[in-house]
Image (cartoon, helix red, strand yellow):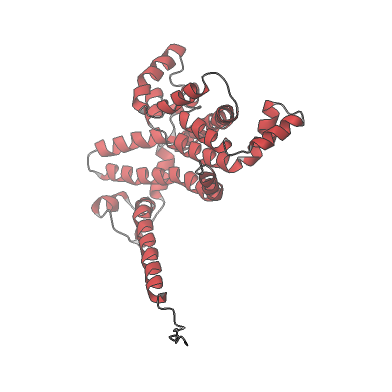
């Protein structure tokens, strides 16, 4: 018995819904981008506007009013270059300690067996649940006993080896095949030689992600620096901006306070530029590192 077949239309019936869904997805992405980028756009634009215009019409936009007066006043009245230098010192020193010792700790937890290994790693994970404010008083007392208040030691050493970084590197290094380590042992490589010659090249994406995360955490840290540092010589950018915001919001509405608003926005824009540049340069490595550390 012959079976009759119905003609199949060559036109894809689902092409319109697929295009519609894609269009809606693009619109949602653009809307999300606008929501997240608007504060930054507002900050940059108002850093170029006169202070009086900012107070009278905060959401206004008139390119004819743009000038660099706020930036000149900021560079003349605010020690932002010194604060940037202090922040750079803290980022380099603290970041170096993080990038040296946290991968080594993660290597030990991932690839070696030793007494109380599980208990120690559990203790490391428990410290992740402690609020930062709980540790402020003990750390402050320790820094006072050591005489490190208002020094770079107080900014660099506490938190340089943190639980999250150790946990992150342990997860990344766990993905390294044990066969590579065994081959290095057969060739006569020691523990450190195996780590730097075999493990590090394999976990470079994870190290890049840790570097970016650590950089932003150190750069944006406010709670501990504002407690440990009381003089302007060691102020970081985050502390300087916080003190400027306090002075501006506490000032009475006047021409001088309007100028302070413009200088504050200029300083905020200045402090944002390095992080944006670093993220643009390292975003490929950062994303690869996040994906490398998310498989386990």
Q: Foreground residue, 180 or 82?
A: 180
Q: Residue at x 43, y 30 (%)?
A: 235
Q: Foreground residue, 79 or 150?
A: 150
Q: Foreground residue, 110 or 67?
A: 110
Residue lying at the far top in this picture: please name it.
145
Could you tell whether 174 is left or right of 133 in the image?
Answer: right
Residue 284 screen position, x and y as percent: 55, 50
Could you tell whether 49 is left or right of 147 in the image?
Answer: left
Q: Is residue 8 above or below residue 265?
A: below
Q: Is residue 62 above or below residue 117?
A: below
Q: Residue at x 37, y 24 (%)?
A: 227
Q: Foreground residue, 101 or 5?
A: 5
Residue 30 screen position, x and y as percent: 38, 61
Residue 275 screen position, x and y as percent: 48, 44
Quadrant for residue 268, please give it.
top left
Q: How many marks?
A: 0
Residue lying at the far right in this picture: please name it.
187
Quadrant for residue 9, please give it.
bottom left
* Whether residue 257 can be seen here: yes
Residue 114 screen position, x and y as percent: 57, 21
Could you tell whether 280 is left or right of 192 in the image?
Answer: left
Q: Is residue 255 above or below residue 13?
A: above
Residue lying at the far left in this picture: please name it.
252
* Whether residue 79 can be seen here: no
């Amino acid at each position: 018995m012959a079976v009759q077949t119905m003609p199949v239309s060559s036109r894809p019936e689902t092409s319109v819904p697929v295009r519609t869904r894609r269009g809606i997805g693009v619109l949602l992405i653009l809307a999300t981008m606008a929501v997240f980028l608007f504060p930054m756009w507002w900050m940059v634009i108002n850093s170029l506007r006169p202070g009086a215009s900012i107070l009278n019409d905060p959401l206004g936009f008139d390119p004819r009013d743009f000038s660099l007066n706020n930036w000149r006043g900021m560079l003349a009245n605010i020690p932002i270059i010194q604060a940037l230098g202090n922040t750079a010192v803290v980022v380099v020193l603290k970041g170096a300690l993080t990038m040296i010792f946290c991968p080594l700790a993660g290597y030990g937890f991932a690839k070696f067996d030793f007494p109380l290994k599980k208990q120690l790693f559990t203790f490391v994970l428990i410290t992740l649940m402690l609020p930062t404010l709980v540790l402020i008083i003990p750390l402050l007392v320790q820094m006072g006993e050591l005489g490190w208040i208002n020094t770079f030691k107080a900014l660099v050493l506490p938190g340089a080896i943190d639980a999250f970084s150790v946990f992150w590197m342990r997860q990344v290094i766990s993905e390294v095949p044990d066969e590579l380590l065994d081959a290095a042992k057969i060739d006569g490589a020691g523990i450190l030689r195996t780590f730097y010659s075999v493990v590090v090249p394999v976990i470079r994406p994870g190290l890049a992600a840790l570097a970016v995360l650590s950089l932003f955490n150190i750069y944006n840290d406010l709670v501990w620096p504002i407690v440990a540092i009381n003089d302007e010589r060691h102020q970081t950018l985050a502390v300087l901006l916080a003190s400027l915001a306090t002075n501006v919001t506490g000032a009475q509405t006047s021409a001088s306070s309007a100028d302070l608003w413009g200088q504050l926005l200029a300083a905020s824009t200045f402090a944002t530029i390095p992080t944006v540049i670093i993220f643009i340069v390292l975003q490929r490595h950062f994303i690869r590192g996040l994906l490398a550390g998310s498989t386990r």
